[in-house]
């Protein structure tokens, strides 16, 4: 037995040997695998695995994060499949574990992401690189935490029609708070829906328009500005942000503190 590990959904993942054929169904974890030097072992990814750029042109696409084509996964004969509890469905996980050992992450906080990175390192024989990456992430966040920056009340929007935001039991919430943005939806669960009037009533200092999964544009910002003007209220500061730095829990985390420095200086 190469390794037996308990994943973040408390499932036992037994690997009889070091995996040499890996399928990743989570974009941020795909990017992590490449960071750990495992690109040559990737045999299947989703159509949303856009980073590093050009990866989907080189590796077989087995579907999306919510809908995969099981026959394509069978074809590439993986010896490890990497999933996530939120991004993939239970049906996908059940289908995958019939094909190969399947690791499922469950990420709600930065510490969960760090644990997942360590697990991936253990399973793929890249523990040294994983530990180095974890140390870099911790150092970068610690340095950022020690810098003086006052928190502002912020609303993070991920969708429109209806508007959707993030509650305090999400990974985005944890990263927001670490970045100096106090989530005005603290206490809410998961991804609450909001009306335009709800947003006005909340009256945040800043509204963060995520670049994903919904691509907000200037017209969306103008709609918010006009609504606040009609209510005779000062418009919040409106910022379009790169959602990957708030929601991707793999190797991109090493650059997240620096992204916040740039964002806060604008």
Image (cartoon, rainbow, N blue to C red):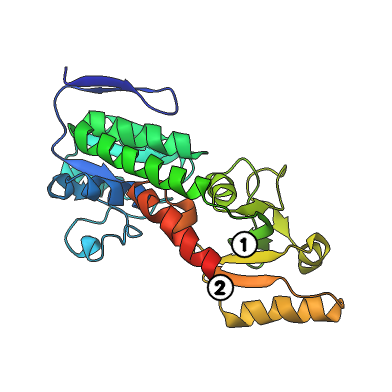
Q: Residue at x 19, y 56 (%)?
A: 59
Residue 185 in the image: x percent, y percent?
71, 50
Q: Is residue 60 above or below residue 120?
A: below
Q: Secondary structure at mark 1?
A: strand
Q: Are marks 2 and 1 in contact (CB under 8 Å)?
A: yes
> Which of these two is toward me, 180 or 214?
180
The label number, if any, that marks residue 216 in the structure image: 2
Q: Residue at x 19, y 47 (%)?
A: 42
The answer for how far apart the CA atoms under marks 2 and 1 are is 9 Å
Disc on the earlier residue, 2 or 1: 1
Q: Quadrant of the N terminus?
A: top left
Q: Residue at x 53, y 68 (%)?
A: 265
Residue 10 appears in the rendering: yes
Residue 53 in the image: x percent, y percent?
26, 65
Residue 211 appears in the rendering: no
Residue 126 in the image: x percent, y percent?
19, 35
Mark 1, residue position: 157
Q: Secondary structure at mark 2?
A: loop
């Amino acid at each position: 037995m190469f390794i037996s590990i308990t994943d973040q959904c408390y499932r036992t993942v037994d690997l009889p040997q070091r995996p040499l054929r890996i399928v990743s169904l989570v974009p941020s974890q795909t990017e992590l695998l490449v960071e750990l030097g495992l690109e040559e072992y990737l045999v299947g990814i989703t159509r949303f695995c856009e980073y590093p750029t050009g990866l989907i042109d080189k590796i077989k696409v087995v579907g999306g994060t919510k809908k995969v084509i099981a026959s394509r996964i069978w074809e590439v004969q993986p010896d490890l499949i990497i999933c996530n509890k939120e991004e993939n469905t239970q049906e996908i996980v059940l289908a995958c574990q019939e094909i190969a050992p399947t690791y499922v992450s469950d990420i709600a906080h930065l510490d969960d992401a760090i644990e997942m990175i360590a697990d991936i390192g253990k399973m793929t024989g890249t523990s040294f690189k994983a530990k180095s990456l974890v140390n870099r992430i911790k150092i970068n966040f610690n340095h950022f935490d020690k810098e003086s920056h006052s928190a502002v009340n912020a609303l993070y929007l991920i969708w429109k029609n209806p508007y959707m935001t993030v509650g305090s039991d999400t990974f985005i919430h944890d990263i927001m708070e670490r970045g100096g943005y106090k989530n005005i939806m603290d206490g809410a669960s998961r991804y609450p829906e909001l009306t335009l009037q709800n947003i006005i009533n909340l009256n945040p200092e800043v509204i963060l328009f995520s670049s994903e999964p919904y691509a907000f544009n200037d017209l969306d910002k103008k709609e918010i500005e006009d609504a606040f003007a009609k209510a005779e209220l000062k418009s919040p500061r409106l910022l379009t942000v790169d959602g990957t730095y708030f929601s991707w829990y793999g190797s991109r985390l090493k650059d997240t503190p620096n992204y916040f420095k740039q964002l806060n200086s604008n």
